[in-house]
Image: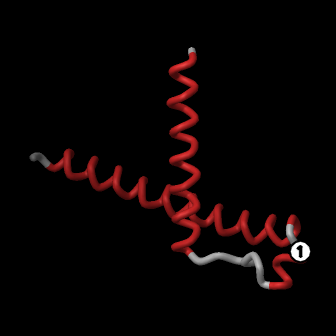
């Protein structure tokens, strides 16, 4: 492979990594911002976490992506 191929592949992987970090940061921040306001009693009693870890944010992001993918597939079939 020539040098431009490696630059393109490296740049693409870097963009994917930056995008993944931004998505996980958004999930963490949105969780910490909205969940305590929606469920204040449950958070104060420890039933729902007020903040989540990076790994939990990753799992939620994957779960939402799978649900969105399934919704997109079903929507495409009905058309």
- Would residue 51 appear left or right of 15 to someone viewing this image? right
Please provide percent x and percent y for residue 17: 42, 60
- Quadrant in which the C terminus appears: top right
Q: Quadrant of residue 13?
A: bottom left
In the image shown, does 1 or 33 lie closer to the viewer?
33
Q: Quadrant of residue 63?
A: bottom right
Task: Identify whether 76 is placed above or below 45.
Answer: above
**Number of marks in picture:** 1
Label 1 CA crowd tier, 10 Å (few <14, some 14–19, many 20+): some
Image position, residue 32 (x, y; %): 75, 71
Q: Is residue 48 left or right of residue 57?
A: right
Residue that sits furthest to the top in the current view = 79
- What is the secondary structure assignment of the residue under circle 1? helix
- Residue at coordinates 51% horizontally, 47% vertically from top-left? 66
Residue located beneath label 1 in the image: 40
State the scheme by which the image is colored. secondary structure
Seen from the viewer's position, the closer of residues 41 and 37 is 41
- Residue at (47%, 60%) from the top-left corner? 18
Residue depicted at x 27% and y 50%: 9
Instruction: Name above or below for residue 26 compared with residue 3.
Output: below
Q: Residue furthest left?
A: 1
Q: Residue at point 78% right, 84% down?
A: 46
Q: Position of residue 50 (x, y in %)?
A: 76, 78
Q: Is residue 63 above or below residue 69?
A: below
């Amino acid at each position: 492979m020539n040098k431009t191929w490696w630059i393109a592949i490296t740049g693409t992987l870097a963009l994917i990594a930056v995008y993944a970090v931004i998505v996980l940061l958004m999930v963490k921040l949105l969780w910490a911002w909205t969940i305590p306001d929606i469920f204040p009693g449950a958070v104060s009693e420890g039933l729902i976490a007020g903040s989540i870890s990076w790994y939990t944010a990753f799992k939620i992001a994957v779960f939402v992506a799978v649900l969105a993918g399934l919704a997109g597939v079903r929507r495409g079939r009905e058309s």
